[in-house]
Image (cartoon, helix red, strand yellow):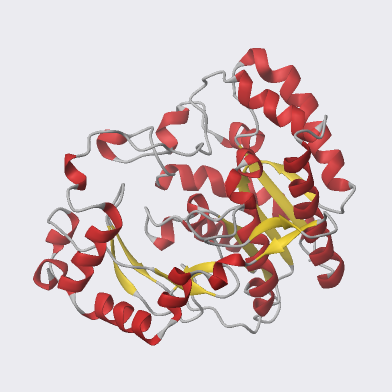
């Protein structure tokens, strides 16, 4: 395995996939600082986690002089393990701003699988160490309806207090699995997976199953940043129920707690907070009037908490080249159109997210 990694054959030959994540007291899991190796899911890339525990360049906690720093949070769409670091929309944004003479540093704090609740916990704990000038949380609108927002068995989630108010809960800290991974024995296992390809292969099989290749059932995929045009009106109606009718009550209580936490962070830090939502509604023409009304409702509700909405879907539509299809922006090789953003998708996403940052840049 090491011989393969030392040659160009790592792009096509069997590989032991790197184990990137370890336990974290604040978010349940996080990137392990200094880990390096190869990612092979969807597309093969070489990954190096910085000393600060980021899928990013080495980034000093002290902010460079005359630099506007953006804390970027989100899930696997933003973490972007499927492309080289220089191809991520975070890196593309920095280069595009530099070409215009603006010193912008985007600190990528995203984690695969992160819910909005995890992003809030990471904003409070990890992001503030970098003294950002603004925070941008990139999530699917459907994430706010996910059952994971109330399940704290693996990572932070919103649970009701005895008084009925929902707050971030950290039940995962007392779980046997978390305590094992945080123990000396757990640290030994991580050391073995980092230094032994045999141990890494065993760990990979434990995670995916010993005979994973024999399972032909396609795994469910979360909503993509871009839509193929399918008109799922049921998803749109669930969003309308939540944002306009404030139902179901429990989900609305979780949404209120999430918005309250973002408002609290904004008040204490003095930084603008932008919630960049994608997959708000299907892209079919029949849904456009209802979608427009929904976006207005979301924007007003966020504004009441001092939070800005960035409509990623609309920004993507405005920046997608006319000669490119939606499916061209995600997937790799024979699976073009399915999965995470590819390099072209990241270029378009960079342009779509720039418009959320520009209004907050200091005057020249």
Q: Residue at x 44, y 37 (%)?
A: 329
Badge count: 0
Q: Residue at x 76, y 28 (%)?
A: 241
Left or right position of 132 against 244: left
Quadrant of residue 174 within the rendered picture:
bottom right
Q: Residue at x 58, y 49 (%)?
A: 148
Q: Name the residue at the top extreme.
A: 286
Above/below status of 167 relative to 281? below
Report the front residue among 12 and 86.
12
Q: Name the residue at the bottom extreme.
A: 184
Which quadrant of the rendered structure holds the C terminus? bottom right
What is the x, y in percent for residue 202? 20, 66
Which quadrant of the rendered structure holds the N terminus? bottom left
Left or right position of 242 against 205: right
Left or right position of 308 against 8: right
Above/below status of 260 relative to 237? below
What is the x, y in percent for residue 234? 62, 21
Q: Name the residue at the left extreme.
A: 3
Report the front residue among 48 and 150.
150
Above/below status of 277 relative to 171? above
Residue 221 seen anywhere in this rendered image of the structure: yes
């Amino acid at each position: 395995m090491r011989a393969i990694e030392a040659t160009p054959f790592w792009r096509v030959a069997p590989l032991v996939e790197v184990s990137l994540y370890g336990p974290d007291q604040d978010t349940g899991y996080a990137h392990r600082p200094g880990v390096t190796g190869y990612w092979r899911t969807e597309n093969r890339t070489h990954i190096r986690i910085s000393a600060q525990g980021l899928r990013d360049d080495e980034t000093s906690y002290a902010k460079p002089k005359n630099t506007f720093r953006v804390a970027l949070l989100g899930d696997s769409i933003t973490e972007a393990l499927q492309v080289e670091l220089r191809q991520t929309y975070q890196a593309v944004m920095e280069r595009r701003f530099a070409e215009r003479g603006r010193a912008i540093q985007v600190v990528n704090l995203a984690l695969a699988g992160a819910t909005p609740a995890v992003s809030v916990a990471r904003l409070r704990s990890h992001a503030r160490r970098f003294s950002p000038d603004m925070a941008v949380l990139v999530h699917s609108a459907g994430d706010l309806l996910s059952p994971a927002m109330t399940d704290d068995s693996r990572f932070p989630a919103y649970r009701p207090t005895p008084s009925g108010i929902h707050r971030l809960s950290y039940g995962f800290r007392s779980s046997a699995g978390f305590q094992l991974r945080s123990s000396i024995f757990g640290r030994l296992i991580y050391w073995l997976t980092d230094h032994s390809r045999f141990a890494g292969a065993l760990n990979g099989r434990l995670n995916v199953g010993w005979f994973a290749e024999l399972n032909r059932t396609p795994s469910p995929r979360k909503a993509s940043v871009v839509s193929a045009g399918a008109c799922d009106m049921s998803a749109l109606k669930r969003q309308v129920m939540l944002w306009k009718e404030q139902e179901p009550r429990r989900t609305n209580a979780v949404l209120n707690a999430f918005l309250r936490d973002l408002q609290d962070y904004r008040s204490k830090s003095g930084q603008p907070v932008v919630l960049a939502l994608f997959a708000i509604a299907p892209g079919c023409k029949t849904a456009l009037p209802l979608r427009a009304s929904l976006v207005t409702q979301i924007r007003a509700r966020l504004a009441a908490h001092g939070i800005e909405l960035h409509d990623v879907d609309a920004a993507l539509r405005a920046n997608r080249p006319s000669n490119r299809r939606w499916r061209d922006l995600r997937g790799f090789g024979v699976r073009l159109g399915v999965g995470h953003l590819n390099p072209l998708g990241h270029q378009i996403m960079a342009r779509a997210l720039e418009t959320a940052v520009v209004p907050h840049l200091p005057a020249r």
